[in-house]
Image: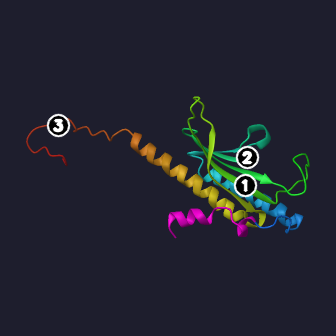
Amino acid sequence: MTPDEDFESQQSSPEVVGAPGRLFEEELSRNMMALHDGMHALGSTYNKHVFLAFEDPLTFGAGHYVFYPLEGHGSRFAVTELYTGTDWQDDERVPTSWSWESEVHVPSTDGSYPWVTIAEGEIASDNYEQLLQVTENWAETTYQLAERADALTQDPVDRGDAARSGPGRTFLA
């Protein structure tokens, strides 16, 4: 599978979104907890370069689970719970699906840097594992970019004889 095909397979589709409300409340709760545990595990796995914030989308505007790179903060990956037949004030609400957005800061003509969505999708509750895979792809890519940046900024190896000159001196010795 090419990277483009892999990305396309993670996008929202009728098969992925499905019709909400087909699962029983117990199944929805189980899926919600499995997603929560999976998000927490991803946050722990990639915590050297990626930070997981548990946020309130009404207050902060991103999502319920928001991953940020530790370096730069120029991008984020947000997952928001979606509900059917209830509102935010219902304490017993259980998500029937989740939406996700990959966003970056982009400079605008007025000098501000608004968040711009570069990829998005919606995934039904019974497909929560697919959402974990999409999230892990973002976290792993962000992690690898930070690792490469770290490798480029490391101090060169200090050899005591590096200043040595004279006969027999080569680039290899």
What's the distance in space between the residues labelled 1 and 3, CA to CA? Answer: 61 Å
The extreme left residue here reads: 167
As helix, strand or loop, the secondary structure at mark 3 comes to loop
Which residue shows up at 72% across the image and 67% down it?
Answer: 14
- How many C-alpha atoms fall within 10 Å of the one at disc 2: few (<14), some, or many (≥20)? many
Could you say which is closer to the camera, residue 95 or residue 104?
104
The extreme top residue here reads: 111
Which residue shows up at 55% across the image and 67% down it?
Answer: 5
As helix, strand or loop, the secondary structure at mark 2 comes to loop
Q: Are marks 1 and 3 in contact (CB under 8 Å)?
A: no
**Badge 2 is on which residue?**
63
Does any portion of residue 56 appear in the rendered image?
no
Tell me which numbered mark, 1 or 2, is placed earlier along the sequence: 2
**Badge 1 is on which residue?**
99
What's the distance in space between the residues labelled 1 and 2, CA to CA? Answer: 9 Å
Kind of residue indicated by mark 3: Arg
Tell me which numbered mark, 3 or 2, is placed earlier along the sequence: 2
- How many C-alpha atoms fall within 10 Å of the one at disc 3: few (<14), some, or many (≥20)? few
- How many C-alpha atoms fall within 10 Å of the one at disc 1: few (<14), some, or many (≥20)? some
x, y percentage for residue 151?
Answer: 41, 45
Kind of residue indicated by mark 2: Gly
Would residue 24 appear left or right of 110 to someone viewing this image?
right
Which residue shows up at 82% across the image and 57% down it?
Answer: 95
Image disc number at residue 164? 3
Magenta highlight range: 1-17
x, y percentage for residue 94?
Answer: 85, 56
- Residue 57 on the magenta segment: no
Q: Are marks 1 and 2 in contact (CB under 8 Å)?
A: yes
What's the distance in space between the residues labelled 3 and 2, CA to CA? Answer: 58 Å
Would residue 77 appear left or right of 160 to someone viewing this image?
right
Would residue 102 appear left or right of 56 to someone viewing this image?
left
